[in-house]
Image (spheres, rainbow, N blue to C red):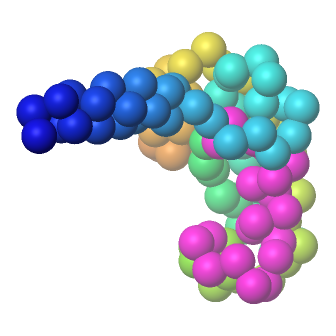
Amino acid sequence: MLGSTSEFSLAVNPLQADRRFEFPQMTTEKSCLCWYVYVLLNPDGKLYIGQTRDLSFRLHQHNDPKHTLTRTTKRFRGPWEIVHSEMLPSRSAALAREKSLKSGQGRAWLNGHLGC
């Protein structure tokens, strides 16, 4: 009985370790292991700021009426277009940049650089 427990733990642990670092492949953009901060604009001039690993897939999610995890952009009429994006080396850097763009100074920077 003890042998079967150790065999089970040996079979489970390597798989769990692999899953922690495995990312689903959606497009070739993900092969660079970088993160993106992006700014979307709708026809009414509403801005949305977010971060992702796959820009094209995320834009598709924002514009897909059947996708329910993008409730913020569903409240406003689309289609949404990417007007600005930045590539960053890590998720923590992307989250920090997203937070700075959502601040008053970040919105002023976007207004000055993008005119929106």
Compare residues 21 and 38 and report the one nearer the observer: 21
Q: Position of residue 93 (x, y in %)?
A: 50, 21
Q: In the rendered image of this protein, does residue 1 appear above or below residue 87?
A: below
Residue at the left extreme of this rendering: 2
Q: Is residue 42 visible?
A: no
Q: Is residue 13 left or right of residue 108?
A: left
Q: Position of residue 6 (x, y in %)?
A: 20, 28
Rendered image quadrant of residue 62: bottom right
Q: Is residue 101 left or right of residue 96?
A: right
Compare residues 80 and 9 and report the one nearer the observer: 9
Residue at the top extreme of this rendering: 89
Q: Position of residue 30 (x, y in %)?
A: 77, 30
Q: In the rendered image of this protein, does residue 78 appear above or below residue 48?
A: below
Q: Is residue 75 visible?
A: yes
Q: Residue at x 77, y 18 (%)?
A: 32
Q: Is residue 14 left or right of residue 3?
A: right
Q: Residue at x 88, y 58 (%)?
A: 81
Q: What's drawn in magenta, residue-wise?
A: 52-70
Q: In the rendered image of this protein, does residue 59 appear above or below residue 84?
A: below
Residue 58 magenta: yes
Q: Position of residue 57 (x, y in %)?
A: 81, 53
